[in-house]
């Protein structure tokens, strides 16, 4: 990608006194003409780059810009590396790791495994997610529509969207874009997408604000939950809601109180605890769980 190459060229210029266009062309596996265009783009962006012709000529950043060579600290560069490596974990490639090697940041700390933060965004569904993520990235870059079959709690449907953003949140991957069927922006979970195909239709990307990904916006509900849990469930409550989500009772049980955003998810979550949990409130959801348990007893009897 061009932006990766521009970042790489800029970093090399910050670390070296002077380099030649053929050197950069070989380094980034492009033509000299492409490197010349990249240098022009960096100049337009306000980077004071000087070029010198002749035997000892080359490309360099002007002397009055050398004070900014330490713009990024060692810690900041490690954070950048951690972020780039996390992107590699999505699809199992080494694309961003190779980019960091090309940057040659002037210290071996980054390449010697001396980083202190490791981020892995891969999931159990990597084999199915990676092709979707790659296809959607290309669709977003090329402004092309995508079509797919979507499975939702209310049923399945065929959708066609104009994708704008790939989003990782709530431990899952989503695509956010303009849905032609609903005539509105929608968020789609990648694990629920099937038969994803890239359309030949090109769309004009509008200037839109970033999606509102607040929990209240995506999962409205505001369900006030009260439940009793066996003491053995403490570790899980702390992991999912924090150490202050319950009060320990005299008999050792845990009185849990919290706001929940989705009824179906709440029912599923309570049932995963089996006999170690009892939902007290809301009453209507408690009744639904009782009905589910009765139907389960009938199925297993």
Image (spheres, rainbow, N blue to C red):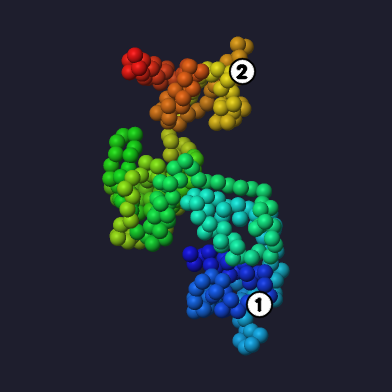
Please say if 80 is above or below 70: above
User: Circle 2 is placed at which residue position?
Assistant: 248
Tag 2 secondary structure: strand
Identify which residue, 226 or 267, lies in the foreground.
267
Q: Residue at x 40, y 46 (%)?
A: 128
Which x, y percent locates residue 109?
A: 69, 57
Q: CA distance from mark 1 to mark 2?
A: 67 Å
Q: Residue at x 52, y 26 (%)?
A: 258
Q: Residue at x 56, y 55 (%)?
A: 84
Does residue 24 show up? yes
Tag 1 secondary structure: loop
Residue 18: give its label.
Answer: 1
Outermost residue, bottom side: 54
**Count of labels in the image:** 2
Which x, y percent locates residue 119?
A: 58, 47
Q: Is residue 131 left or right of residue 29?
A: left
Please say if 66 is above or below 293: below
Please say if 207 is above or below 182: below
Locate residue 286: give its quadrant: top left
Of the 4 image quadrants, the one containing the C terminus is top left
Locate residue 101: give its quadrant: bottom right
Identify which residue, 198 or 185, lies in the foreground.
198
Which x, y percent locates residue 234?
A: 59, 23
Depth check, mark 1 against mark 2: the one in front is 1
Does residue 206 show up? no
Which x, y percent locates residue 277?
A: 50, 18
Q: Residue at x 40, y 58 (%)?
A: 138
Q: Residues within 10 Å of mark 1 (few under 14, many from 20)?
A: some
């Amino acid at each position: 990608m061009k932006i990766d190459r521009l970042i790489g060229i800029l970093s090399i210029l910050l670390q070296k006194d002077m380099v030649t266009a053929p050197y950069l062309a070989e380094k980034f596996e492009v033509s000299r003409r492409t490197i010349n265009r990249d240098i022009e783009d960096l100049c337009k962006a306000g980077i004071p780059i000087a070029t010198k012709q002749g035997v000892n000529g080359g490309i360099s950043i002007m002397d009055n810009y050398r004070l900014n060579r330490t713009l990024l600290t060692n810690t900041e560069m490690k954070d950048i590396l951690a972020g780039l490596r996390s992107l590699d974990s999505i699809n199992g490639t080494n694309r961003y790791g190779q980019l960091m090697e090309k940057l040659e940041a002037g210290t071996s700390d980054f390449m010697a495994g001396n980083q202190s933060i490791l981020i892995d965004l891969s999931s159990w569904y990597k084999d199915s997610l990676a092709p979707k993520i790659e296809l959607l990235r290309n669709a977003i870059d090329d402004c092309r529509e995508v079509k797919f079959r979507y499975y939702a709690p209310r049923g399945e449907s065929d959708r066609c969207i104009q994708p704008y953003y790939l989003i990782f949140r709530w431990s899952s991957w989503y695509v956010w874009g303009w849905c032609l069927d609903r005539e509105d922006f929608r968020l789609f979970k990648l694990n629920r997408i099937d038969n994803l195909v890239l359309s030949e239709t090109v769309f004009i990307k509008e200037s839109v604000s970033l999606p509102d990904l607040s929990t209240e916006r995506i999962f409205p509900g505001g369900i006030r939950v009260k439940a009793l849990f066996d003491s053995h469930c403490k570790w899980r409550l702390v992991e999912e809601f924090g150490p202050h989500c319950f009060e320990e009772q005299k008999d050792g049980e845990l009185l849990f109180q919290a706001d929940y955003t989705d009824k179906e998810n709440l029912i599923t979550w309570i049932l995963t605890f089996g006999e170690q949990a009892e939902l007290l409130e809301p009453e209507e959801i408690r009744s639904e769980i009782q009905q589910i348990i009765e139907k389960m007893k009938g199925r297993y009897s």
